[in-house]
Image (spheres, rainbow, N blue to C red):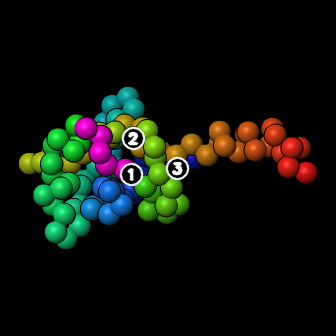
Amino acid sequence: MIKEEYEWYVELEGEVIGELINAEYVDMFWYEYIVIPNKNYEYLISDIQLWNDCKFKFFNKVSLKYANNAFGHYLPLERKAYMRALYIDERKNNFFKRLFSFLYL
């Protein structure tokens, strides 16, 4: 499983506009990240309405896979985001692949 503790890219409309780094466990299911905007995208990653409307996509820096159910809240003065469901559970996919592998023989 790719966990919350890993670092993530923040994407908007196909452009990587920033990164989430230095994850810290906050509370049940919530992690805090430092938000690093990419050059010329600070105005987008700081847009509270984009965060509230869940317009961003998040993908892992190592696997480059998306966390499809992730959402969060951004605090612009602190440059921190509080995120939930920022992980990729690969076990589910592997289970079904093994379960139905006989179909692909």
* Residue at far left of view: 77
Q: Are marks 3 and 1 in contact (CB under 8 Å)?
A: no
Q: Residue furthest front?
A: 13
How many neighbours does mark 3 have within 10 angstroms: few (below 14), some (14-19), or many (20 or more)? Answer: some
User: Where does the image place residue 90, in percent across and percent down from the top left?
Assistant: 61, 46
Q: Which residue appears at 25% of the width and 38% of the height?
A: 53
Element under label 2?
A: loop
Numbered circle sitting on residue 70: 2
Please tell me which of labels 3 and 1 falls first in the chain.
3
Tell me the quarter of the picture where residue 82 sits.
top left
**Residue matched to label 3:** 2
- Give the distance between the C-alpha atoms of the residues marked 3 and 2, in whole angstroms: 13 Å
Q: Toward which corner of the image does residue 16 lie, by quadrant?
A: bottom left
Residue pictured at 22% horizontal, 37% vertical: 52
The three-letter code of the residue at mark 2 reads Ala
Q: Which of 29 and 9 is in front in this view?
A: 9
**Residue 67: x and y, percent?**
46, 46
* Amino acid, disc 3: Ile
Badge 2: residue crowd in 10 Å (few <14, some 14–19, many ≥20): some
What stretch of residues is rendered in magenta? 53-58
Q: Image height check: is 30 above or below 6?
A: above
Q: Position of residue 46 (x, y in %)?
A: 15, 51
Tell which of 49 and 31 is nearer to you: 49
Residue 10 located within the stretch drawn in magenta:
no
For this view, does 93 lie left or right of residue 28?
right
- Identify the secondary structure beneath mark 1: strand
What distance separates the C-alpha of mark 3 from that of mark 1? Answer: 12 Å
Q: Mark 1 points at which residue?
A: 58
Most extreme residue toward the bottom is 39
